[in-house]
Image (tube, helix red, strand yellow):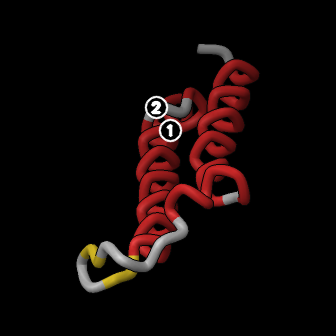
Amino acid sequence: MSRQAFQWLFVILMILCLLPLIFPIYEVANQGTPIIVGLPFGFFWVILWIVIAFVIAVILYLVDPDNKNREE
């Protein structure tokens, strides 16, 4: 994968992870009634997407073509 394609993939995936945290989509999760892991659903929703973004960033770091060149 080329460096530019990898950068575009990273940007697109991070935007897709952050979209559920802004106004129109967040309204679906903006509820307090279901309690998950002791948190209101809205707070759990935000933490969930932050964790998902972190996991995607770690996976992309591991498959980054520049990192593979440094190891050799």
Tell me the tag on residue 71.
none
Q: Image quadrant of residue 3? A: top right
**Callout 2 touching callout 1 (CB < 8 Å):** yes
Percent position of residue 25, x then y: 63, 51
Percent of width and height locating residue 57: 52, 48
Rendered position, 66 above or below 43: above
Of residues 46 and 67, the one drawn nearer to the viewer in this rendering: 46
Marking on residue 60: 1
Q: Where the N terminus falls, by quadrant? A: top right
Residue 16 vertical position relative to residue 4 in the rendered view, above or below: below
Picture quadrant where residue 27 is located: bottom right
Amino acid type at image mark 1: Leu
Q: CA distance from mark 2 to mark 1?
A: 5 Å
Residue in the image at 44% along x and 53% along y? 52
As helix, strand or loop, the secondary structure at mark 1 comes to helix
Q: Secondary structure at mark 2?
A: loop
Determine which quarter of the picture holds residue 35.
bottom left
Give the left or right position of residue 14, taking residue 36 as reference.
right
Q: Residues within 10 Å of mark 2 (few under 14, many from 20)?
A: few
Residue 4 picture location, percent across and down = 75, 22
Question: Foreground: 3 or 45?
Answer: 45
Dot 2 corresponds to which residue? Answer: 63
Name the residue type under label 2: Val
Which residue is at 53% across, 37% downward?
67
Mark 1 neighbour class, 10 Å CA radius: few under 14, some 14 to 19, many 20 or more: some
Most distant residue in the top direction: 1
Q: Residue furthest front?
A: 33
User: Can you say whether 65 is above or below 25 in the image?
Assistant: above
Mark count: 2
